[in-house]
Image: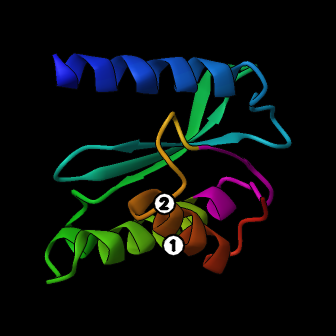
Amino acid sequence: MAIKKKLDRRTRIKYRVRKSVRGTADKPRLSVFRSNKAIYAQVIDDLAGKTLAAASSHAKDIGEKKMTKTEVAREVGKVIAERAKEAGVETIVFDRNGYLYHGRVKSLAEGAREGGLKF
């Protein structure tokens, strides 16, 4: 029961945030998904319904190193920033997807800022 409550809470927060956070062609949305083992990030243009760039901790260059999950999240942030810049994206809107801005989610955001994304 506790797990269902937690997921319901995150879903309510997610929809509440998504009412105001929209990605456009000039300012797409950086969406984060966090599981127990991995972290994923996508840069999405909501108007066109297209994913412009994506990165995850399953990538060979990230997954092979011995790091904590927070350090891995920072590396994923840097990779997503690099791939977004290749796609021509400089500024984004950050979508924490119902997660608290703390720990791995915060680390990914800081990594993306280090990579050169503005938000």
Q: Is 85 part of what is drawn in magenta?
A: yes
Q: Nearer the viewer, residue 73 or 17?
A: 17
Location of residue 93 with respect to 10 vertically, above or below: below
Which residue is tagged 2?
Answer: 102
Which residue is tagged 1?
Answer: 78
> Which amino acid lies under the numbered mark 2 shown in the image of this protein?
His
- Seen as rendered, the residue at the extreme front is 2
Q: Which of marks 2 and 1 is nearer the N terminus?
A: 1
Task: Please name which of the two marks, 2 or 1, marks the residue nearer to the observer.
Answer: 2
Where's the C terminus, which quadrant?
Answer: bottom right
Residue at 38% of width from left, 66% of height from top?
Answer: 73
- Name which quarter of the figure residue 74 lies in: bottom left
Residue at 66% of width from left, 28% of height from top?
Answer: 17
- Seen as rendered, the residue at the extreme bottom is 66
Q: Is residue 110 left or right of residue 41?
A: right
Residue at 31% of width from left, 26% of height from top?
Answer: 6
Q: How crowded is mark 2: few (under 14 residues within 10 Å), some or many (20 or more)?
A: few
Location of residue 101 with respect to 85 vertically, above or below: above
In whole angstroms, how far apart are the C-alphas of marks 2 and 1? 17 Å
**Mark carried by residue 21:** none
Where's the N terminus, which quadrant?
Answer: top left
Which stretch is magenta? 84-95
Residue 56 place in picture, x, y as percent? 33, 54
> Which amino acid lies under the numbered mark 1 shown in the image of this protein?
Lys
Q: Is 77 part of what is drawn in magenta?
A: no
Q: Which of 95 and 102 is in front in this view?
A: 102
